[in-house]
Amino acid sequence: MGEQRKLTVVDLFCGAGGLTAGLEMAGFCVLAGNDCFDAAGKTFENSHDQATFIPGSIQDLSAKRLRAATGLKKGELDVLAGGPPCQAYSVYNHQRGMHDERSQLFREYLRVVEEMHPKFVVMENVTGIFSAGGGEALQAIKEEFAKLGYKVREQVLRAEDYGVPQERRRVVIIGNRVGAPIIHPEPTHGPGLKPYVTIKHAIGDLPLLKNGENRGTLEYAAEPQGEFQTLLRGNRTTVENHAAPRLGQVNMDRLKHIPPGGSWRDIPFELLPAGMKRAKRSDHTKRYGRMTWDGLSCTILTKCDIHWGAYIHPEQDRAISVREAARLQSFPDSFVFSGSKTEQYVQVGNAVPPLLGQAIGRALLEAMENAEVEETAA
């Protein structure tokens, strides 16, 4: 199918372009991305030569603008993809619900679906969407898709099952209006399959850093070890965005007591933050966690704050760098993240891991091929 013409994609809420990168790896041609986050847009533009970045909120994104950017008429686009921002549904936000104005971004996404009338749709979100509004949010989305002529199905995908060195759960809704089967990707890693990609496989070749150290562009510390590092390094000889956040002295004193796989429970009582002195031993399981070389990373969030999770380097007494977070998300090293350090972490944490995006892309191709075979047989 791919030989006849390039299959086209528009990526809404594209951020730095994690899903775009993954779909490109699967062989799609992403024509345009839209986001209101300027720093992410700059990263997207620098990383995707063939895609037009359209800045601004989705509320201001007209079909006319999209058609001009892509050169496509209504009904010609193959895939409309995107993950409307998920704070309203995140398990970290206890006031989530359909009344939240951010949930209206789903309506905007659906407006673009109606106006562009793509053949396939892909929507990614946090698992909190299952419980948002008592399940009302997900039901509403499925009903709206049905009204527009799309049959959709959701499935929870685990990033680690597709070669991402991180425990990350996301709901992926896939659908189409062309009668093709709805296929979610089959796991490629895990028991009986390829081994999971570990933290060592992911970041073991990156240069040593001290707490707070920023030496700019660096050479790699070693030759690439294994398939994952080889893939992500590509033909690069230097690495960007590899600087250690500066932790204060009190945190540095805490870190000394935490072994690989350890956490806040290993910190002497007198050094604990006041709030954590009252915590039960069963609480805050990942806080002040130190990674282990042979394990998977916890979910990369928009802040790799050691007070929030296991973001301490396995050996070095420091928090992980933006590049290490990006590797744990499976971003190629060719992605150079723009903006402030805080904005860079947000771009990495908000992204769909590219290797998960690639798996989704391959599942779409399989569905498209099946639909063609059925048409030919008919």
Image (cartoon, grey):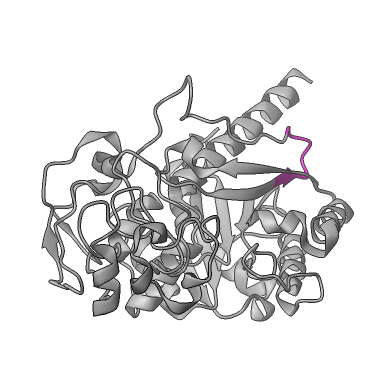
| Residue 152 position within the rendered picture, expressed as x and y whole percent measured from the top left | 77, 45
| Residue 181 position within the rendered picture, expressed as x and y whole percent measured from the top left | 73, 32
Horizontal side of 36 relative to 252 (left or right) equals right
Residue 49 appearing in the image: no
Q: Residue at x 38, y 66 (%)?
A: 306
Horizontal side of 316 relative to 296 (left or right) equals left
Seen from the viewer's position, the closer of residues 320 and 107 is 320
Q: Residue at x 54, y 73 (%)?
A: 35
Q: Residue at x 49, y 46 (%)?
A: 167
Work out which quarter of the rendered image holds the C terminus and state it: top right
Q: Is residue 175 magenta?
A: yes
Seen from the viewer's position, the closer of residues 61 and 298 is 298
Magenta segment boundaries in residue numbering: 174-181
Horizontal side of 157 relative to 40 (left or right) equals right
Seen from the viewer's position, the closer of residues 230 and 90 is 90
* 197 to 298, vertically: above or below: above
Q: Is residue 107 magenta?
A: no
Residue 369 appearing in the image: yes
* 243 to 370, vertically: above or below: below
* 275 to 357, vertically: above or below: below
| Residue 273 position within the rendered picture, expressed as x and y whole percent measured from the top left | 41, 75
Q: Where on the picture, by quarter, is residue 105? A: bottom right
Q: Residue at x 22, y 64 (%)?
A: 240
Q: Does the magenta stretch mainly form a helix, a strand or a loop?
A: loop
| Residue 270 position within the rendered picture, expressed as x and y whole percent measured from the top left | 35, 73
